[in-house]
Image (tube, rainbow, N blue to C red):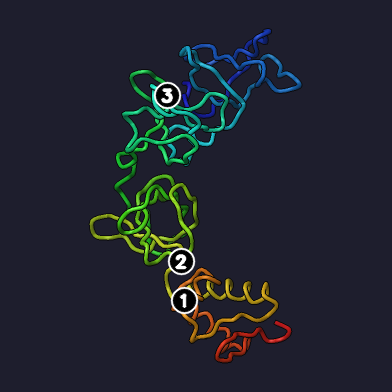
Amino acid sequence: MLYLGDFNELEVLRLTEHGAFLGSADGDVLLPGRYVPNPAPRVGERLRVFVYRDSEDRLVATTQRPLARVGEFAALRVRDVNAAGAWLDWGLDKDLLLPWRQQRREVQPNERVVVYVYLDETSDRLAATTKLARFLDPDTAELAAGQPVALLVTQETDLGFAVVIEQRWGGVLYRNEVFQPVRPSDELPGYIKRIRPDGKVDVALQASGYEDAVADATATLLDALRAAGGRLPLSDSSAPADVHRLLRMSKKTFKKALGHLYRTGVVTLDPAYTTLVQGE
């Protein structure tokens, strides 16, 4: 069986001036000459190729690696817009179509948009959509509070940011818990904060729990102190805005990290500065 929009291991049947013809249960697939490896493969050898349809609906293979496969979410740049919709740069010579009817709002050239790649059942072609909700898994039984996860920011909302978790689930990152610049299309490491009774998932960019949060913040503070030559113009009386500007963390988190370093003798404090103890 041929997997359209994914990688396939296919056997080389014959080599021609146009490229290599590869065998599959769904018919021969052309690997155009510009993608044939050098030195050329032998007949009978198997190649790992990505398979899709060209502009004339013919099956075609490539050794290029797309930025997303069928069934995946990805942030892609809009290369062009025309009567058919928006054309996205997804790492292949042939762009990926985002049809007008699959756009939550009209996208513009050079904009980065988060899409889901799917196989259109009518045309049997790969396409993209920004209408993501129906492709998210509502069953969150595999998630647990504190679990580290990969996040893809999809859009800004009144509460903060909507995210895709681990290419599978939807979640919310709350604005008042974000202490760094975040934009739609950003890919970030994060953590499961809580799973609500209705199955909705809250996420955070910092580890939940006192020990994990302090460990992360302490490492950040130490790195900042060393980068500044051992002294920072911050103390436990500093304004929250100053803490955020220099460390990208909340004042509450900063005080926990600062207290830990002070109690363990790593830093000394005065009203306006924190100083790294010599030798640390």
Disc on the earlier residue, 3 or 1: 3
Real-space CA distance between mark 2 and mark 1, rounded to the nearest whole angstrom: 11 Å
Q: Position of residue 54 (x, y in %)?
A: 50, 17
Q: Quadrant of residue 235?
A: bottom right
Q: Position of residue 244 (x, y in %)?
A: 49, 71
In the rendered structure, which amino acid carries the disc numbered 1? Thr
Q: Residues at badges 2 and 1 in contact (C-beta under 8 Å)?
A: yes
Query: What residue is disc 3 on?
Result: 82
Q: Quadrant of residue 47?
A: top right
Mark 2 crowd level (few <14, some 14–19, many ≥20, 10 Å Cα): some
Residue at position x 71%, y 16% in the image: 42
Query: What residue is disc 1 on?
Result: 253
Q: Is residue 111 left or right of residue 143?
A: right
In the structure shown, which secondary structural element does the residue marked by tag 3 occupy?
Answer: strand
Mark 1 crowd level (few <14, some 14–19, many ≥20, 10 Å Cα): some
**Position of 205 relative to 107 (above/below):** below
Disc on the earlier residue, 2 or 1: 2
Disc on the earlier residue, 3 or 2: 3
Q: Nearer the viewer, residue 222 or 51?
A: 222
Mark toward the viewer: 2 or 1 = 2
In the structure shown, which secondary structural element does the residue marked by tag 1 occupy?
Answer: helix
Q: Nearer the viewer, residue 212 or 234?
A: 234
Q: Is residue 198 left or right of residue 104?
A: left
Query: What residue is disc 2 on?
Result: 179
Residue at position x 72%, y 86% in the image: 278
For the C terminus, give its image quadrant: bottom right
